Amino acid sequence: MSEPPRRPTLDDVAAAAGVSRATASNAYNRPDQLSAALRTEILRVARRLGYAGPHPVARSLAARRSGALAFLLDASVSTAFSDPALSITLDALATAVAPAGDALLLVPGGDAAAAQLREAHVDCAVAYSLPDRAPVLRVVRERGLPLVVLDGPARRGAALVRTDDRAGAAAAARHVVDLGHRDVAILGTPLRTGTDGGPVTAEQALTSRYRVDRERHAGYREVLAGAGIEPAVWQAAGISRPAAARTATALLTGAAPPTAVLCLSDELAAGVLDAARRLGLRVPEQLTVVGFDDTPTAAAADPPLTTVRQDLTGKGRLASALATDLRAGRHPHPPPPLPVTLVVRASSAAAPR
Amino acid sequence: MSEPPRRPTLDDVAAAAGVSRATASNAYNRPDQLSAALRTEILRVARRLGYAGPHPVARSLAARRSGALAFLLDASVSTAFSDPALSITLDALATAVAPAGDALLLVPGGDAAAAQLREAHVDCAVAYSLPDRAPVLRVVRERGLPLVVLDGPARRGAALVRTDDRAGAAAAARHVVDLGHRDVAILGTPLRTGTDGGPVTAEQALTSRYRVDRERHAGYREVLAGAGIEPAVWQAAGISRPAAARTATALLTGAAPPTAVLCLSDELAAGVLDAARRLGLRVPEQLTVVGFDDTPTAAAADPPLTTVRQDLTGKGRLASALATDLRAGRHPHPPPPLPVTLVVRASSAAAPR
DNA sequence: GATCGTATCTGAAGCGCTTCAGAAGCGTCC
DNA sequence: GGACGCTTCTGAAGCGCTTCAGATACGATC
């Protein structure tokens, strides 16, 4: 194995073109600072030497900016991405930052997250629905990184993007109450990792580590309590559709099966539909199921899910805009919560009598 | 808004601790190069000053390594992640590189991909099932980045991780042939973007831009042709389950409905199950459906999918190992194709007579 | 013809760190 | 008592680039 030849640097290009390094640099960064002819010549020489452009790391060091944002996840990659709401939001964010040449550095949850972020070549962090005391946020503070928080937790100095989850949940609950349901269950995400799923107390649900979950539970409860309904609250075995199906099977075959299930996400709701189908329960005649988020899963479900729509794409784009402000040293006004809409489809109907 | 105070540097720490910069550096990077007592003292001083550790970018420039790999996707984030096979592979890769402090920079397909990679602070790239002439690979070459290719396309100098897709497809086809099916359809991924889905010729399928697809189509064809069967080959409207369901509805209600559908992924197969259910077709009695990959979707489907298992986690781990070799300047031996296994579940049965 | 503005290019000072070749100090060994 | 080997620490040379304050040249301006 021969030693790989040293890659050319900007100095090599400058020397070969007979100009100063500053001029060679300007050929790449400030075309208006040199004559067009010379610029062309420099780029031609660069190509001849096999120079691929200024070294990104050196460029960042000198210019004090890096072309990447850290995207902080709560869970492992496969777990986090088992809810399409994440993909959609992330997609919008990635698409919004791409034109500026920026990319996203994926920092999954886990033991290594803090160390990864400590070494990350980023000048901004975007947190996606982290639990209240995520250790990785400490590194964000220590490094003094601008922070955009999606969904929570709130942090001083950070820009918070949130949806009016409570109002959305309230609308969903109102919907099932109006349909005459009295035996209502709420299916939420796992309150702690590694659970098999099952009933929890309303208090436990309201003190979830995730802001979004707390808000949604609170919204449901608000309306249900107002209607004199004490819902059964269950945590699913995971956030994926199959995990929800497992838990829903237990819920629907339990001692006091509900006639309506309010779910904290569309994936969970789709899992409930799967479980109901296997149990021979007809939706919506015998069981009403309501989701949350209005991901493609909702419209494609059988029957199509009644759900609470939130603008996931707008969320990602807003995060990008806030990150841009923060990186530029501007301190944007806190945006208002993004609105939600109840979308009534075919998975909800009057309570069986 | 006051000017933010300049963040302390290693020089500040060294000065405050009364040592040279080299020693302060060693406190972080080579604990064996200084006395434990002094090291503790230096770190104490650092904490007092609010020094968060060596600046990652400067560190990378000096040490000539960066703590990140680029993960190159063919499509947008939400599209790419609509197949869990990607999440699982990516998860394994991310988990494997995390202990070394490395993270993954997400580079989605699209116009900005090349520019993003040109600016990326990475010292290795991992390509996930890119089409044959992905423009982003040109930047990989220009920058001289080590490259690990998952599934394809092969590139000289790159480490290629592949699965024995052809054998897997052949096994799936053999299975349905042995069950007596003669009217067989193949449901593949879109051959070009933006298609509505529909029939394609066998030749078109065999010249897909994706190596994996070519191999799987070839494997099916090999066995089917040997049995004298000319399958109907369809491309789905997308790689997601709902997209597959749409196309499958057309396929199953067409002029010559198949009794068995071989699908290029589990998501596609799940979509076929959805379509069949809505059409009142019983699986497997009236229709046999076979998937590919054995993602969690397969086992959780109703009925559970017969599919071809490949070791997605192992694939991600192998990619990590190869990347490590490449980054260290070692040139690993080309690994053999990862093995596949046919997993027979409840979605396949003898052809209706 | 002196002054000025403009377009173009350069020198040099960093950006914040790693690392290598020593230097210094000190106990050991024969 | 001098050579030797350790451990511990330092000086200085980069890593490859951006950018700012000039320098230079030249046609325009009054």
Image (cartoon, coloured by chain):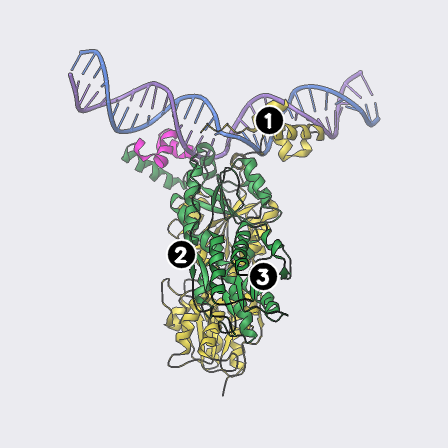
Chain colours: A green, B yellow, C blue, D purple
Q: Whole-percent x and y of residue A233?
A: 59, 60
Pointers 2 and 1 in contact (CB under 8 A)? no
Same-subunit check for callouts 2 and 1: yes
Q: Which SS class for mark 1?
A: helix
Whether A352 is drawn above or below B36: the answer is below
- For the residue carrying disc 2, how many other residues have a C-alpha within 10 Å: few (<14), some (14-19), or many (20+)? few
Where is mark 3, residue-wise? A230
Gap in Å between the C-alphas at discs 2 and 1?
50 Å
Whether A195 is drawn above or below A148: the answer is below
- For the residue carrying disc 3, how many other residues have a C-alpha within 10 Å: few (<14), some (14-19), or many (20+)? some
Q: Whole-percent x and y of residue B114?
A: 40, 48
Disc 2 marks which amino acid? Arg
Disc 1 marks which amino acid? Val
Disc 3 marks which amino acid? Glu
Where is mark 2, residue-wise? B133
Pointers 1 and 3 in contact (CB under 8 A)? no
Mark 2 vs mark 1, foreground winner is 1
Nearest to the observer: residue C20 or residue A31: A31
Mark 2 vs mark 3, foreground winner is 3
Residue range in magenta is A8-34
Label 3 chain ID? A
Label 1 chain ID? B
The answer, for residue B311, to whether it is visible in the render is yes
- A250 in magenta: no
Where is mark 1, residue-wise? B13
Left or right of B142 in this view: A77: right
Same-subunit check for callouts 2 and 3: no
